[in-house]
Amino acid sequence: MGNIEFDFFANPSKANNMDITESYHIRINNSQIIDLKELVRRIHLSCSMTPSDVHGVLIALKDEITNALAQGNKVNIDGLCRFRLILGSKKNSKCNGREEGKDIGFKRIRISPCKELNEETKKKLMPITRTRGKHSSDISDYNVINILLEYLKINKTITRKQFEGLFNITRYKASRLIKTLVEKKVIKNIGYKSHPVYTLND
């Protein structure tokens, strides 16, 4: 087990200027996703249950939590977290108090960690060190457009992932810049909504 590596990243400004930042947030650079398969392996190594048994229990736990929530119940797993169903209006972002049952539906599931989970995580926290993460380049709108025009003269199209690499920026900022460039009619999407591919706007 190694250290937790972090760095500071600039928050985007609410102003309509892509170069202004107001504050910073902390992001972990070396985090990994622990999926169900890895979770089963880890639990198996720490108890006498077989991987199949562990997998079965976890799936059954998920099913029972969803069943309980679907009935309007709250679920409390001692020492871990609490689950609660949140309802909302199907038609409006806010309820007006005149909705019937058919107008109300699923909004989200609220998950709240228990105090014990927070305390135990704090006790087990690995050493924390700062490392250089992938930062968004400080670049003006004018330079973005000029660099992009030169790129598209040669390559004709660009994806969001390629946009990230071209400007050495995060996924969030790439999406934000692309949205702005599309609104300014500098580029347009010639791909699918779920898999966009951008080219110069004629």
Image (cartoon, grey):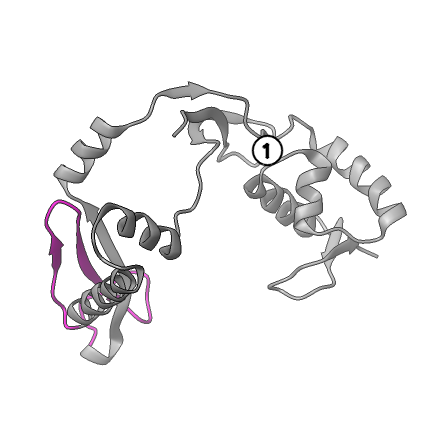
Q: Tell me: 34 left or right of 59.
A: right
Q: Position of residue 121 (x, y in %)?
A: 23, 33
Which residue does the image show at 58% across and 38% down from the upper left? 170
- Report the magenta stretch's main SS: loop
Q: Is residue 90 magenta?
A: yes
Q: Is residue 190 magenta?
A: no
Front residue of 2/93: it is 2
Q: Tell me: 146 left or right of 8.
A: right
Which residue does the image show at 89% across and 46% down from the upper left? 154
Q: Position of residue 95 (x, y in %)?
A: 24, 64
- Please provide the residue range marked out in magenta: 71-100
The residue positioned farthest toward the right in the image shown: 154
Q: Position of residue 162 (x, y in %)?
A: 71, 46
Q: Tell me: 26 left or right of 166.
A: left
Element class at badge 1: loop
Which residue does the image show at 47% across and 24% down from the upper left? 8
